[in-house]
Image (cartoon, rainbow, N blue to C red):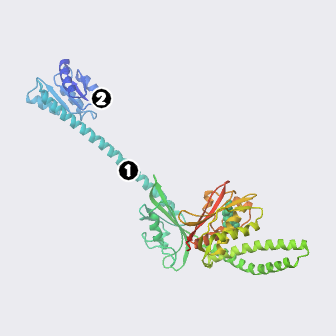
Amino acid sequence: MILIVDDRPENIFSLKSILELHSFAVDTAGSGDEALTKTLKNNYSLIILDVQMPGMDGFEVAEFLSGNNRTRDIPLIFLSAVNTEKKFITKGYASGAVDYIVKPIDTDILLLKVKTLHRLYEQHSQLLTTQAKLESEITFRIIAEAEIREKARELHGILASIPQVAFTATALGEIDYVNERWYDYSPSLEKFPGVCPGDPVISDQWKKMLGGTSALELETRIGKLDSNDFRYHLLRVVPVAEHGKVIRWVGTFTDIEEQKQVEKKKDEFLSIASHELKTPLTSIKGYLQIMDKVLTEDGKTRAFAERALNQVNKLDGLINDLLDVSKIENGELKFDLHELNFEELVASTLDMLRQIYPAVTIEHNNTVDAWTRGNALRLEQVIINFISNAIKYTPSCTRLSVITRVTEEGNLYFGVQDAGIGISAENQEKIFGKFFRVSESAARAQGLGIGLYICAEILNRHDAKFGVQSEPGKGSLFYFTLPLIVKE
Ligand code: ADP
């Protein structure tokens, strides 16, 4: 807006009309005092100031304006009919005017000057706004950087005090801090600790991880500098994210050697125990089978022998599972794959299961006459495990359904749907692990938590995909898919 200051209303009127005709917003003041009051309240892009006014004259107004931070950048044009002498014009400029026009006013010249000064002022204001924004952004950044430095200092303080080997890295993976313990294992900040030959190489895993946003967990043996003694460590690297973007990585190596040794001893014990139990159990089973055959007349005694044989069979199953686990651990679970008719395998396994569980209706409606490559005994073991679990974890189970079909991708699909207790999403990730049992189900049914672990190993060796879909309280669907063989 432009402010016109003149003590004569007729002057104001004619100037105002000209400027408004050219679309300028105009405000007016009839004296120097009024002009100063208005400039304190409003923002003006230009002030046209009459020099000759009663009271405060134009020069004085200009001096006030140039002495005030708020108004000193507003361009001024002096208007005067009288003070055309050079010294007055000079005084006008000295008191802050940007331009000087003498009366009678040449409208074209006035308009040109007004337009130019008005535009200059607008540009100047825009520059000031941009500068202010830049300044506040710079201040914001300086504060943010100081905060980040402070946080990093705190984090490094914590990492220095923990018993683990620890480090931090930039989002791009450059290690920028290591604690004192790091130097027991590595000569420099840039080099990861050396790993035992044959163990996963840390830098390879590190590169893979950097592309994503998930944490890395890796068990590997690392050795102190100049030592051949490698100890198991759990390397965990977690991302620190801000607004969904990884800003740094924090990593620790935790010594888990003792834990590993205990696990190893436990595995060895289970392996020895199951081997040692297997031999006497096989002969007990043999004698019980003979007794079962011999004791045909004495009904009561025979029933006892049958029950004993039943229990011995269960025990035999458990010991076989434990033996399988130790074979998996030692890489000794060996079996061959042959072409087999999948539907025949499913049908015969279901027949056997129907005899074992006469109270349960096992539905299997849609059959697929298809072939795959696999080990019949081991696949049977998986099917038995899925179905006996479905029965075991469904209170008073009387019915469950088995689904076999060919998938859209052309694979064989096998699934067992129960209406049992279900499994939470968190536990679904864990149940195929070794010795894992969901605590609620452990209270309902006996088990060792190794059946699914063995199934997973068998299915992996068949290049099968497998998994579970389940909701607590609504039942579970355990499934696997196998590659199909097209027969002539
Ligand atoms: P086990 O049955 O001997 O405990 P598994 O390895 O076969 O061992 O199963 C691991 C765990 O998975 C079980 O303890 C149980 O908690 C859960 N689970 C397996 N199958 C089912 C199912 N059909 N419904 C609910 N939970 C199941």
Quarter containing ligand 1?
bottom right
Which of the image's four quarters has the C terminus?
A: bottom right
Check the image and report above or below for 86 versus 369: above
Q: Residue at x 72, y 72 (%)?
A: 318
Residue placed furthest toward the left: 85
> Image quadrant for the N terminus?
top left
Q: As displayed, is residue 359 above or below residue 136?
A: below
Q: Position of residue 330 (x, y in %)?
A: 62, 78
Residue labelled with disc 1: 141
- The residue beneath circle 2 is 42
Q: Position of residue 37 (x, y in %)?
A: 28, 25
Can the viewer see residue 330 in this picture? yes
Seen from the viewer's position, the closer of residues 63 and 313 is: 313
Q: In the image, what residue type sits under mark 1?
A: Arg
Q: Do we see residue 438 in this rendering?
A: no
Depth order, front residue of 64/75: 75
Instruction: Report crowding for label 2: few under 14, some 14 to 19, many 20 or more residues within 10 A (C-alpha).
Output: few
Q: Looking at the picture, which amino acid does disc 2 mark?
A: Asn
Q: Residue at the spot x=18%, y=31% of the render?
A: 114
Q: What percent of the width, then of the height, locates residue 397?
A: 74, 59
